[in-house]
Image (cartoon, helix red, strand yellow):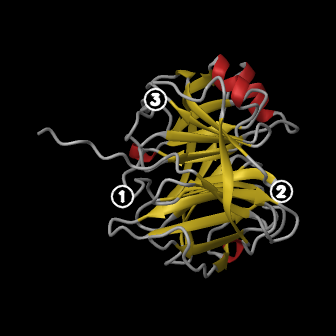
Amino acid sequence: MIRNVNSKGRLQVRRVVDVPLREVSGICLRRSRNGRRSLIAVGDHAAKVAWFSLSRSDEGRISWHTSNIAKLSGSLLPKRDSQIEAVCADGQGRIALLQETPSRVELVDPNACKVVASIDLVVEGRGKLAQAWSDPKGSRGEGMALLPGGHLLIAKEKKPAVFIEFGPPHSRSRGLVRGGALPDGERWPVKKGHHRYVPLATWIPDKKLAKHCADFSDLEIGADGYLYLLSDQSCTIARLDDLPAGGGTAALLDAWRVEDVDGKPEGLAFTAQGRAVVGLDTRKPRRNLVLLEPAIAQLRRRHREP
């Protein structure tokens, strides 16, 4: 059932938080099997990561920790102007960092203090997507989600705004259906070392999604199993339908307008209660993370049959 597509719902700011990073460009939720959750934030000003443990309520005290990724063994990220645009985490605490220029992903093991895998995102050929991907003035990966089988779902920001599934050459597209993302607590299955990933499938936005989301800024999986998209230019969060294996069209299910935020919405995550958390790209490390209400991605319990 499609709701809020023609007339958007609206999300209000419930809480404002200071992240100790400039120019926050991506956030994500790390979910472990024991139920513990941490919010992770990155910025594209410097190669740093900030995180804190989430409490069971949305009003708990926040104690940030930070780490300099550029100092880790095996990292190719520069200390300044790192171009990190998105972050994801698997259930074992490893962190995937998406770099827009050059187009690549570093998989970091914070416990071992090293980069365990480096993945080049390559789009070859002479097609429109390849030309747009190689354009030095164009946009590339801006949002990311981890898929089973070691694949990646990447949101290209604009011109064109499109979803791309990357994986090893000659592997099959998996797509993403509701509940089909990497399960909580699971390890993202990628071998150590250097890898080269290519597009396995693409999904272009349908007319309704293109109307509500002028660009693609971040991706996140909600507790309800749906894929969610954040648009900076439209200041909108969208819930998406399944992305069928092999590519096709990305369809909009729901959309909500984000109200009264001071900064560019660049990162998206959700609390355990299903409330959206949005990271803001601001010049100073203050008032750059907002908690929104009402909840839109909460896990819905199925009614038992009498």
Can residue 98 be seen here? The reply is no
CB-based contact (under 8 Å), mark 1 and mark 3:
no
- The front one of 179 and 74 is 179
Above or below 296: residue 44: below
State the quadrant of the N terminus. Answer: top left
Q: Residue at x 56, y 72 (%)?
A: 59
User: Does dot 3 land on a helix, a strand or a loop?
Assistant: loop
Which amino acid type is marked by label 1? Glu
Q: Which residue is mark 3?
A: 242
Left of 285 or right of it: where is 205?
Answer: left
Q: Which residue is mark 2?
A: 262
Q: Residue at x 44, y 47 (%)?
A: 150
Real-space CA distance between mark 2 and mark 1, rounded to the nearest whole angstrom: 36 Å
Question: Which of labels 3 and 2 is toward the front?
Answer: 2
CB-based contact (under 8 Å), mark 3 and mark 2:
no
Q: Position of residue 63 (x, y in %)?
A: 61, 82
Which amino acid type is marked by label 3? Asp
Q: Which residue is mark 1?
A: 186
Q: Position of residue 135 (x, y in %)?
A: 83, 33
State which quadrant residue 275 falls in.
Answer: bottom right
Q: Residue at x 36, y 58 (%)?
A: 186
Q: Position of residue 219 (x, y in %)?
A: 59, 45
Outermost residue toward the left in this view: 306
Lower position in the chain sequence, tag 2 or tag 1: 1
User: Does dot 1 land on a helix, a strand or a loop?
Assistant: loop
Left of 217 or right of it: where is 249?
Answer: left
State the quadrant of the C terminus. Answer: top left
Real-space CA distance between mark 3 and mark 2, rounded to the nearest whole angstrom: 32 Å
Q: Pointer 3: residues within 10 angstroms few (<14), some, or many (20+)? A: some
User: Does dot 2 land on a helix, a strand or a loop?
Assistant: loop
Question: Which of labels 1 and 3 is toward the front?
Answer: 3
